[in-house]
Image (cartoon, coloured by chain):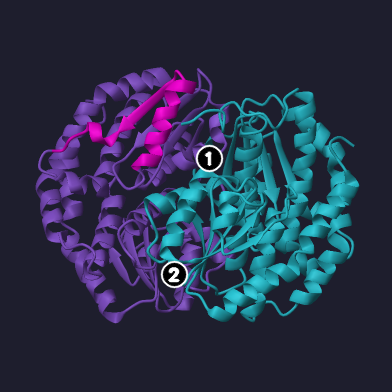
Chain colours: A cyan, B purple
């Protein structure tokens, strides 16, 4: 299978889940000290991940947890982000310019910074109060959600925490590679059908909204140089639907959390107005050993990511376009 | 001038500003009672307006004010929206399905509902605790910002409140029609150049972000049936920039609030990677009588709206496409 290293992918997920004692120690320490509010800080792909985890928490918790956009922070500011706040961030390079600027200002405020920073010794790693270093692609959401789960457990909102993580540890690593194998045929067919689209619309809701936002922008636009637009399922019905016709390329991601009905509503409409739509439903990817009641947490997103990884691998090969080249980003100053 | 009734537009703005005693009375009453947090509730266009005003407040205030998406509310929920919260909404028809559903749930929670509802006796008008009825198109932001300004005044964050509104009352109504006249030539040229674009990208930041979000979705897509994508200026640099080439149609809105530097950064980049870009800067539209220091508030958005109104009027005529027809919205059930 193209661009697929089963052993490594299993090890990557196992390793991410094995970060739990470290994450628990951090969370329990800041919990003990107390806090006024919690911010997931990001820009671009990490902003998308922040939206995913905050939507996840909102559905289950009364904790004051918010998304904070890095560039909006150092321009507009946020006076409710105080010395008693906790700020959580993630970075592969540890050098993302806007995040560095935001973190520098947050340090003057005195909030506690928790960073999942993949590059040891990088500027962001140095500035954070707590740092977790685990450079495995595709594990950002596991880290963000794991931290969130510990917060909710400490807040008395996740009694099944231990059971849930036991299931993930036992079944997630293999479950995900099995899902990816299952998705490969679909990924090839989708890539063949859409790799020259003049425009592709991606729709999602719940914790899949951040996923489609990121998929359209960080994968199709940034990596594959293909035009795409992401739109929240609820927002699609308030404008964007009017430009959909028979031939418009539309893909709907359906997840398994509280906002599933919003995506289902779009699924019901699409066949009546479009003949070029695709529905990717995480429900179509069963994972042995993981309880039904837990699928709407991080799993449904991770399954969607398995599917899109297959699409991207085939688009890369068919379009003869290496996903790691950039026209402009970090090519020159602007 | 096409689709331009100077007298009516002046009267509309005057009338919106004349709502102030009514808005002040409402705000002062809820202020007196106390509250834990404030939510601007919306979907589609009203969600965009909510984003504008909350960004505005974040830059100037420590009040706990948030955007709450209507459909996310009745699916995911928000446990921090309580009986002690204030919820502000706006609706032209007073019947927007998702907002009605959200409001019904909010009523069971017991929060105080303030509605700017244009249709008297509509279901939303009946459900709100406070209702302001003033059906004049293009005044939603004035209403939302006016309420915000009173909150900030009461919170000791807007000492110049009276002076500011005196300037608006004296100079805004005429200032806006003068700006619109000034923008008409540009609007025609822009419409001629872009009315058949296969895709158009709109970029903005600060309180212009909600404006470009809404302009792309509620005007180009929904009303003109033209493909468009909105992207925040800070996010544009984290993905979308890679699909921009010489011929890509890109329009950047530059406002005058704290996030202006984020748009200026894009303005510096665009000429190097694109030959089909347009910059609309609210600074190019002076308004006599309104102090420089107040331009970044509601004015810079209203000026942008003057410019886009001219574009839309010409697109409508040139494309022979009435802006008030819909393919799907409210045409059948879905």
- Image point 40% across, 66% down: which residue? A80
Question: Where in the figure is residue B152, as x and y percent of width and height?
Answer: 26, 65
Q: Who comes first in sequence, dot 2 or dot 1?
A: 2
Left or right of residue A118, residue B41 in this image: left
Identify the main secondary structure in magenta.
helix
What chain does badge 1 belong to?
A
Instruction: Give the extent of the magenta segment.
Output: B260-287
- Image point 54% across, 57% down: which residue? A127
Q: Which mark is residue A240?
A: 1
Mark 2 vs mark 1, foreground winner is: 2
Left or right of residue A184, residue B161 in this image: left
What residue does disc 2 label? A83
Question: Where in the figure is residue A106, as x and y percent of width and height?
Answer: 45, 59
- Give the camera-side residue of A125 and A77: A125
- Image point 42% across, 56% down: which residue? A105
Question: Where in the figure is residue A12, as x and y percent of width and height?
Answer: 81, 53
For label 1, the SS is helix
- Give the camera-side residue of A307 and A269: A307
- Image point 26% across, 30% down: which residue? B3
Q: Is residue B142 magenta?
A: no
Quarter holding the N terminus of chain B is: top left
Left or right of residue A188, residue B334 in this image: left
Q: How dense is the environment of label 1, judged by Cα within 10 Å: few (below 14), some, or many (20 and up)?
A: many
Q: Does residue A151 show up?
A: no
Q: Are marks 2 and 1 in contact (CB under 8 Å)?
A: no
- Give the camera-side residue of B126 and B44: B44
Q: How dense is the environment of label 2, judged by Cα within 10 Å: few (below 14), some, or many (20 and up)?
A: some
């Amino acid at each position: 299978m193209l661009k697929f290293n089963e052993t490594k992918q299993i090890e990557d997920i196992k390793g991410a889940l094995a970060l739990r004692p470290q994450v628990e120690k951090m969370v329990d320490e800041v919990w003990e000290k107390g806090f006024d509010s919690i911010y997931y800080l990001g820009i671009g792909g990490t902003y998308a991940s922040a939206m995913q985890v905050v939507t996840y928490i909102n559905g289950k918790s009364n904790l004051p947890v918010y998304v904070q956009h890095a560039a909006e922070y150092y321009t507009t500011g946020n006076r409710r982000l105080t010395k008693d706040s906790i700020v959580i961030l993630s970075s592969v390079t540890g050098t993302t310019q806007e995040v560095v600027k935001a973190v520098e200002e947050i340090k003057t405020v005195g909030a506690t910074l928790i960073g999942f920073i993949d590059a040891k010794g990088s500027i962001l790693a140095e500035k954070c109060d707590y740092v977790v270093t685990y450079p495995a692609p595709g594990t950002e959401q596991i880290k963000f959600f794991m931290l969130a789960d510990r917060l909710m457990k400490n807040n008395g909102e996740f009694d099944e925490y231990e059971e849930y993580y036991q299931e993930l540890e036992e079944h997630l690593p293999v479950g995900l590679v099995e899902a990816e194998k299952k998705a490969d045929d679909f990924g090839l067919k989708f890539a063949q059908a859409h790799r020259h689209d003049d425009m592709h619309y991606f729709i999602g809701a719940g914790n899949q909204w951040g996923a489609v936002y990121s998929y359209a922008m960080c994968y199709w636009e940034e990596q594959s140089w293909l035009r795409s637009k992401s739109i929240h399922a609820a927002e699609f019905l308030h404008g964007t639907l009017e430009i959909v016709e028979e031939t418009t390329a539309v893909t709907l991601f359906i997840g398994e959390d509280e906002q599933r009905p919003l995506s289902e509503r779009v699924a019901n409409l699409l066949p009546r107005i479009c003949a070029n739509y695709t529905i990717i439903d995480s429900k179509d990817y069963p994972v042995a050993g993981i309880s039904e009641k837990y699928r709407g947490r991080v799993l449904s997103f991770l399954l969607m990511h398995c599917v899109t990884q297959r699409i991207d691998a085939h688009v890369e090969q068919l379009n003869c376009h290496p996903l790691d080249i950039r026209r402009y980003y970090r090519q020159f100053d602007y």
